[in-house]
Amino acid sequence: MDVIVEGHINQDETMAEVVTAVVALKSCQTPVLRINAAGSDMQGRLLFSPGGYIVGAKVNVTGETGWEAVRMLLNIKDGNYAILDPLRKSTSDINQALWIRTDKILPHLPNLPEIADDFVDQQPHRNQESAVRPKTGQHDLAPAMAVFGNPKDEDALDPAIRLKEEKEERQTVEKKAPSRKYDQSRWRVVRFLLQVSFGLCSAALIMSQSDNIWYVWWNYVWVPVLALFGIKA
């Protein structure tokens, strides 16, 4: 899984802000939030789906899943996190189809109750038809298929064949880092101003040096070209 962004959970960046950042992601349909508690072996992952739902979770060491795992992980007040893009890797081990609405649990963080009844969406608006990720075609069906968990067309791998493990491409970004406040629209404005300035300078140079430009063009370009064909200018 590729690391989209990682950081620390503390007073400056609370768990509620981390969950909000995961839900706001546009580049990944089914992000995974990996959490590690500071000073203990508590660690685990939560699987999100489009629409602001948590569909599953698992604590790595003790093996809790479902709402208990969600509650244990989101109650962490001090630690670190990483938002992962699963790409085409399986997430079935952390997908329990919980359909927990993040907008309902945010006001209660980091002290979630033991019962999840108030946070579960009994009838989430999602497509119930079976779908698989196409290998060809012009239509991008990834958003519609993401709510169903994992792609169904993944080929089974022979356990006897050793595969090369891909390293995670990490991009460590703190909450107050300049890159998390980067606004690409500013660069577009600067680039437009530079292009306009270059165009105006070029036009001014041509207008002010038109005689010299014509002299150089006629004597050093056009006359030698005509001479090649035996024509005298």
Image (cartoon, rainbow, N blue to C red):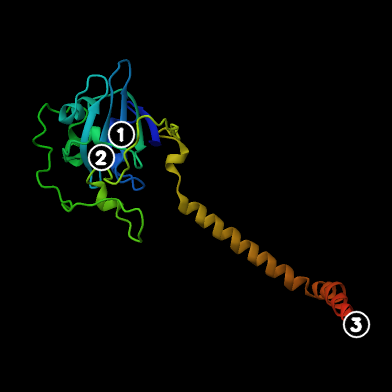
Check disc 2 and report the residue beneath it. Answer: 48
Q: Secondary structure at mark 3?
A: loop
Q: Residues within 10 Å of mark 1 (few under 14, many from 20)?
A: many
Query: Seen in the image, is 67 located left or right of residue 24?
Result: left
Give percent across and percent down for residue 192. 55, 60
Sequence-wise, which precedes: disc 2 or disc 3?
2
Q: Considering only order in the chain, which callout, 3 or 1, is on the residue closer to the N terminus? A: 1
Q: Is residue 153 visible?
A: yes
The residue identified by callout 3 is 230
Which residue does the numbered mark 1 point to in the structure image?
Answer: 33
Q: CA distance from mark 2 to mark 3?
A: 77 Å
| Of the two numbered discs 2 and 3 in the rendering, the one whose residue sits closer to the viewer | 3
Say which of marks 1 and 3 sits in front.
3
Instruction: Single out the residue that lies furthest toward the top.
Output: 39
Residue shown at 24% from the left, 33% from the top: 94
The image position of residue 23, as x and y in percent, is 28, 42
Q: Is residue 41 left or right of residue 222?
A: left
Q: The disc labelled 2 sits on which kind of residue?
A: Phe
- Please say if 150 is above or below 190: above
Q: Are marks 1 and 2 in contact (CB under 8 Å)?
A: yes
Q: Quadrant of the N terminus?
A: top left
Look at the numbered disc 2 and give the secondary structure of its residue: strand
Q: Nearer the viewer, residue 224 or 17?
A: 224
Amino acid type of the residue tagged 1 in the rendering: Leu
Q: Is residue 11 above or below residue 48?
A: above
The label on residue 41 is none
Instruction: Tell me the quadrant of the picture where the C terminus can be found.
Output: bottom right
